[in-house]
Image: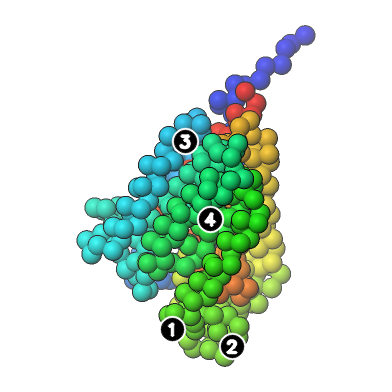
């Protein structure tokens, strides 16, 4: 009788993660071309401008996914504090004229030679890594507010202030929610987490009404149809895209709102283009793919052999889940407008490459469970 042989886990890939991720990246490339070709042709003289760059980003991201799939995740704890320090340096450099790139009234891109990226995306990963390491190391004293709560809040406050100075309220909100969730799962006392909201909520409210454009966004969120030519313009055309799509959509390339009506159709509002061209069926397929990724991330966290791997998986999964929920919520008019990309689908190198690298880390954590 022939004996069954199992391949070594070091060469196995988690298809439950890999297939939905590759599917989303593939759909994203198609939809980026569909949503950006007219804009690219007008601005750059080639309708392939954005899709060529996105394919390059996807290939780079795939390389990192494969590298981090085989890189022992336990070694990442050595980078916890260096990455936090590096994040602070990157976020500070944004305010220097030779490094920061300003667009739409915000300075969110850092230019280092010919290379540019969003430091806020890197800071989010750095925070996940730091929290995973710190929470796992302090488990014996996690209930002590001076050990399990205060240090993490100090790091969060430092990064949040630097991110808010861009300004980028959406990324700061994700960072705060991510930290709160990871501390809760890590065992920090719930009363400390709830009490921390008392001073934070008034500060958030003051920040939102301190600038006229943020106040207008908040008022527009309540009733976008009252400001159809101003702040309500984006959400109105986003909702029109979903309404036009119906059940089956207008067909790939046949959408109307992307033709200089819907702002940023290939980045922040690509979900709206998907709703118009692929319809409710396409939207449900996208949601199902994300649900598989998030379910698998949670499952990996539950079965991790050590606390560090568990918290890393929780942080990566939570960060992706929050970004998906916020982007889709904005596109559907359920949340105020924020400039956040949709993981694996939106145009943008920083988000795509980092998210694919994180999938590689998740795979490595999952593979270690069978060793």
**What residue is rendered at 53% in x and 89% in y?**
227
Q: Say which mark, if any, is on residue 77.
A: 3
The label number, if any, that marks residue 212 in the structure image: 1
Mark 1 crowdedness (10 Å alpha carbons): few <14, some 14-19, many ≥20? few
**Residue 282 in the image, given as x and y percentages of width and height:** 66, 62
Between marks 1 and 3, how big is the CA–CA gap? 42 Å
The answer for how far apart the CA atoms under marks 2 and 4 are is 29 Å
Question: Mark 4 — residue?
Answer: 343
* Residue 225 circle label: 2
What's the CA distance linking mark 1 and mark 4? 30 Å
Q: Position of residue 90 (x, y in %)?
A: 33, 54
- The quarter of the image holding the C terminus is top right
Nearer-N-terminus badge (2/4): 2
Q: Earlier in the sequence, mark 2 or mark 1?
A: 1
Q: Would residue 223 be found to the left or right of residue 30 on screen?
A: right
Q: Residues within 10 Å of mark 2 (few under 14, many from 20)?
A: some
Point 66% across, 54% down: residue: 190
């Amino acid at each position: 009788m022939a004996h069954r042989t199992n391949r070594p886990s070091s060469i196995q890939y988690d298809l439950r993660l890999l297939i939905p991720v590759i599917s989303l990246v593939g759909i994203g490339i198609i939809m980026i071309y569909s949503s950006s070709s007219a804009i690219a042709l007008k601005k750059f003289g080639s309708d392939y401008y954005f899709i060529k760059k996105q394919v390059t980003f996807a290939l780079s991201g795939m390389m990192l996914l494969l590298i981090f799939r085989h890189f022992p995740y336990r070694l990442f704890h050595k980078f916890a504090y260096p990455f936090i320090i590096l994040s602070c340096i990157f976020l500070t450099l944004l305010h220097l004229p030779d490094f920061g790139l300003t667009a739409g009234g915000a300075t969110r891109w850092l230019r280092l030679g010919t290379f540019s990226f969003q430091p806020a995306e890197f800071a989010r990963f750095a925070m996940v890594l730091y929290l995973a390491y710190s929470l796992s190391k302090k488990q014996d004293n996690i209930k002590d507010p001076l050990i399990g709560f205060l240090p993490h809040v100090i790091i969060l406050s430092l990064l949040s202030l630097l991110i808010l100075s861009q300004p980028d309220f959406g990324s700061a909100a994700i960072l705060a929610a991510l930290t709160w969730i990871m501390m809760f799962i890590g065992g920090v006392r719930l009363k400390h987490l709830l009490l921390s909201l008392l001073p934070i909520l008034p500060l958030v409210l003051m920040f939102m009404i301190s600038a006229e454009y943020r106040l207008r966004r908040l008022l527009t969120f309540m009733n976008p149809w009252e400001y159809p030519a101003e702040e309500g313009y984006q959400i109105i055309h986003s909702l029109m895209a979903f309404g036009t799509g119906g059940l089956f959509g207008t067909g790939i390339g046949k959408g109307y709102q992307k033709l200089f009506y819907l702002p940023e159709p290939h980045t922040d509002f690509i979900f709206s283009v998907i709703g118009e061209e692929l319809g409710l069926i396409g939207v449900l397929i996208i949601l199902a793919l994300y649900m598989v990724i998030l379910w698998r991330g949670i499952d990996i966290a539950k079965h991790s052999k050590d606390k560090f791997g568990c918290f890393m998986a929780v942080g990566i999964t939570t960060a992706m889940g929050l970004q998906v929920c916020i982007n889709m919520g904005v596109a559907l008019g359920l949340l105020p407008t924020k400039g956040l990309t949709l993981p694996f689908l939106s145009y943008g190198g920083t988000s795509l490459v980092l998210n694919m690298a994180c999938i590689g880390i998740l795979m490595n954590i999952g593979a270690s469970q069978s060793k």
